[in-house]
Image (cartoon, helix red, strand yellow):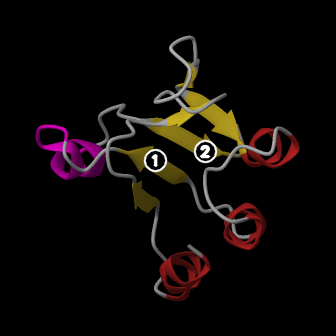
């Protein structure tokens, strides 16, 4: 995660696409273990850090925070997910300043 964040910052990316297999965003609990897990559509960096959500490692999340690099967490197996994210469609969870 940290390597991806560093590279995205280095090349001045507008967003970091974080593909997670079989997970369509960030949840408050593991949806595979908890049927009542709640998915976040949007989340701030600080909320992700304070809630200790396992979006990505804390160093990568902090780098994105410091560089104001939004993160889109999504399932790459979903139909046309990368194309939809690139076109600006709301998919997965967006982690940003708010």
Residues under labels 1 and 2: Cα distance? 8 Å
Q: Say whether residue 49 is left or right of residue 77.
A: right
> From which residue to which does the magenta span run?
78-87
Residue 95: numbered disc: 2
Q: Is residue 79 magenta?
A: yes
Q: Position of residue 11 (x, y in %)?
A: 46, 86
* Number of marks present in the image shown: 2
Whether residues under marks 1 and 2 lie with C-beta atoms below 8 angstroms apart, the answer is yes
Q: Give the mark, 1 or 2, whose residue is nearer the N terminus.
A: 1
**Which of the two marks, 1 or 2, is nearer to us in this view?**
1
Where does residue 28 sit, x and y in percent of width and height? 66, 28
Q: Residue at horizontal 50%, vertical 85%?
A: 7
SS category of the residue bearing label 2: strand
The residue indicated by pointer 1 is: 73
**Above or below 67: residue 97:** above
Q: Residue at x 56, y 80 (%)?
A: 9
Identify the image quadrant of residue 84: top left
Q: Is residue 45 above or below residue 15?
A: above
Q: Which quadrant does the N terminus fall into?
A: bottom right
**What numbered label is drawn on residue 93?**
none
35 w.r.t. 53: above or below: above
* Residue occupying the point 46% across, 47% down: 73
Residue 21 in percent (x, y) is at: 33, 51
User: x and y percent of residue 82 in the render?
Assistant: 22, 52
State the residue lying farthest toward the top.
36
- In the image, 61 versus 89, the foreground residue is 61
Mark 1 is surrounded, within 10 Å at the Cα level, by few (under 14), some (14 to 19) or many (20 or more) other residues, namely many
Residue in view at x 50 percent, y 14 percent: 35
Q: Is residue 98 above or below residue 58?
A: above
In-front residue for pair 29/19: 29
Q: Secondary structure at mark 1?
A: strand
Whether residue 63 appears in magenta in the rendering, the answer is: no
């Amino acid at each position: 995660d940290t390597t991806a964040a560093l590279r995205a910052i280095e090349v001045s990316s507008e967003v970091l696409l974080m593909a997670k297999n079989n997970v369509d965003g960030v949840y408050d609990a593991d949806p595979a273990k908890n049927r009542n897990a709640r998915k976040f559509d949007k989340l701030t960096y600080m909320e992700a850090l304070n809630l200790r959500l396992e979006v990505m490692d804390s160093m990568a999340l902090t780098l994105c925070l410091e560089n104001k690099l939004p993160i889109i967490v999504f399932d790459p197996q979903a139909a046309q997910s990368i194309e939809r994210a690139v076109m600006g469609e709301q998919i997965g969870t967006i982690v940003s300043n708010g």
